[in-house]
Image: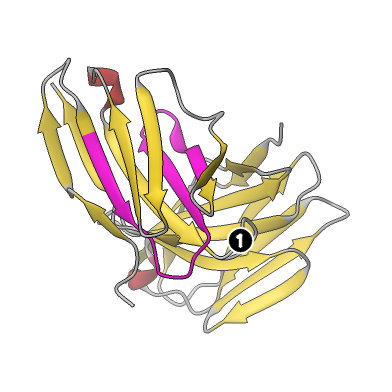
Amino acid sequence: KNEVEQSPQNLTAQEGEFITINCSYSVGISALHWLQQHPGGGIVSLFMLSSGKKKHGRLIATINIQEKHSSLHITASHPRDSAVYICAVSFARQLTFGSGTQLTVLP
Amino acid sequence: DAGVIQSPRHEVTEMGQEVTLRCKPISGHDYLFWYRQTMMRGLELLIYFNNNVPIDDSGMPEDRFSAKMPNASFSTLKIQPSEPRDSAVYFCASSLGTTDTQYFGPGTRLTVL
C-alpha cells in the first residue's frame, strides 16, 4: 500500500510570498494528483502528472519519479489561494490521499 | 456541461434509517468514484466504477454500504442502516480514466443523529 506524506500540515504566508507544498510517496505510481479544497468544501482538481512539470497560471507542479516526491508551488500568493491542498497518488488501481496542507494567505 | 451533480446536498437522518446518495457524472466519463471525507480520516476512496461496473470496492467500510451504477448517467450510494459514525461529506467524482483529471461534485453532507 502506498503511503503518502504531505508537508507542511499547516502553512501561513503573507500575500505575495512564494509557497511550496511537498508530497512524498512510498511506492511507484501511475499518476499523482493535486487537489484544492476551498473553505466551502468544494474540491477542484489542479493537476494530474506522471512526470516532469506542469504550470497553470501561478501554480506549478513538479514530480521527481526517482525520489518519489512532488511539489506544488504558488507564486505571488493571494488570500484567495487560502485552501486545503491535497496530494493523491494512483497505483495499481488504488488511489491514496495525503492528509492535506492547510494554507492561509494573509493580506 | 453542468459538471458532476450530487443530491441531496445535505441530509440529516436518525440512526437506523436508510440513506441514499445520488450522483450524475459528467457525460462521456467512463469512471465514477465515491469518496468519504471526515476530520479524522481525511479523504478516502470508497468504490469506483468503470463503464457502470464496480472495479474496486475495497474501501467500502462494511456491508451496510452498497453502491450501484445502473446506467452511465446515474449512481447511488446507500447506507442501511445508518450509524452516527457514518456522518461525513460524501463526494462523487468522474473522469475519463483512473489516471485522468477527476471532476468532483459539490458533495453531500450527511449527519446521522
Left or right of A98? Residue A93 is right
**Helix, strand, or loop for circle 1?**
loop
- Which quadrant holds the N terminus of chain A? top right
Q: Residues within 10 Å of mark 1 (few under 14, many from 20)?
A: few
The residue most toward the bottom is A57
Range covered by the magenta-colored residues: B20-48
Left or right of A89? Residue A79 is left
- Magenta-colored stretch includes residue A107: no
The picture places residue B95, in percent across and down from the top left corner, at 52, 62
Instruction: Name the main secondary structure of what is drawn in magenta.
Output: strand
The picture places residue A10, in percent across and down from the top left corner, at 46, 47
The picture places residue A29, in percent across and down from the top left corner, at 76, 50
Left or right of B16? Residue A58 is right
Q: Is residue A42 visible?
A: yes
Near-viewer residue (B29 or A100): B29
Up-down relation of residue B89 to residue A20 (above or below): above
Residue ID for mark 1: B97
Residue drawn 52% across the image and 84% down it:
A57
- Which quadrant holds the C terminus of chain A? bottom left
Residue drawn 57% across the image and 43% down it:
A98
Q: Which color scheme does this rendered protein use?
A: secondary structure
* Quarter of the image where one finds residue B56: top right
Near-viewer residue (B113 or A20): B113
